[in-house]
Amino acid sequence: MNLDKIIAVRTSKTIYQDQDTVIKVFDEDYSKSDVLNEALNQARIEETGLNVPELIDVQKIDGKWAIISRYIDGKTLAQLMEENPDKNDEYLERFVNIQLEIQSKTSLLLNKLRDKMSRKINEANISASIKYELQTRLESMPKHTKVCHGDFNPSNIIVGTDGKDYIIDWAHVTQGNASADAARTYLLFWLNGDISNAEKYLELFCKKSNTPKEYVQKWLPIVAASQSVKGKPEEREFLLHWVNVSDYE
């Protein structure tokens, strides 16, 4: 296996291309259970019929765990949006359509989004009273079983040279409420400094899914608190600002 060609470097992992495969190599101290869970998630999403790169193998390379998938030739939607600003709105609509397709699926063996958020709220660096308010709001939200990507942003869509859209990075996928996943995507645009597309995205998602904007906004403090636990220090401060804003309506 040739690890000469690096195509991306992420926190705790390096991604290589070797001919028609992609090898995601995790750092030595990365949790074995998290690696195996990510591979299992990807396999379960393949079974829904969504267009994702084929999972080929999970193995150790030089003492490090690695997930090997089929290489997709193309560009990410984020690259295309940057290269073709005149097509931004067209790409954004494509992006939302892909998210709605994901959320049309179910995979009942996935972890539950509600359980994950509840656990992370308890771990967050916020006061007991705010934790109580967020847990109460979370418990009151409708319980759904839709596939939620968990990190849905334009860099996780590859537009293949074959004209198809491929969805990657299923480490955070859960089953739950689609509006919670939309709130996460909205915050990801903000974290990237792209406030204009954040607002356009939210309008488009709500219009296409027939969801009141206020309903997605009710998820924002919950999602921000849960994401603040593992966020980078500079992101954590931003996310906690959203947690402390009590009303978005």
Image (cartoon, rainbow, N blue to C red):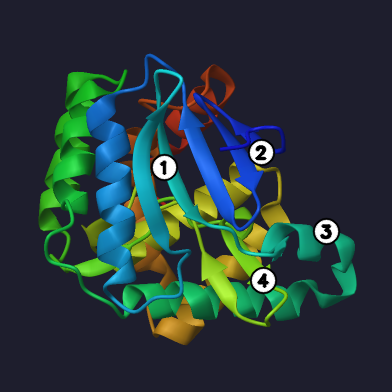
Q: Say if mark 2 contacts mark 3, CB within 8 Å.
A: no
**Helix, strand or loop status at disc 2:** strand
Q: Considering only vertical position in the picture, is 236 above or below 79?
A: above
The residue that mark 1 highlights is 67
Q: What is the three-letter code of the residue carrying label 3? A: Glu
**Cα–Cα gap, marks 2 and 3:** 18 Å
Q: What is the three-letter code of the residue carrying label 1? A: Ile
Name the foreground residue: 70 vs 154: 70
**Helix, strand or loop status at disc 4:** strand
Q: Say if mark 3 contacts mark 4, CB within 8 Å.
A: no
Frontmost of labels 3 and 1 is 1
**Cα–Cα gap, marks 1 and 4:** 21 Å
Frontmost of labels 2 and 3 is 2
Of the image marks 2 and 3, the number of the one nearer the N terminus: 2
**Helix, strand or loop status at disc 3:** helix
Q: Residue at x 56, y 53 (%)?
A: 21
x then y, percent, for residue 150: 38, 52
Q: Considering only vertical position in the picture, is 152 above or below 2?
A: below
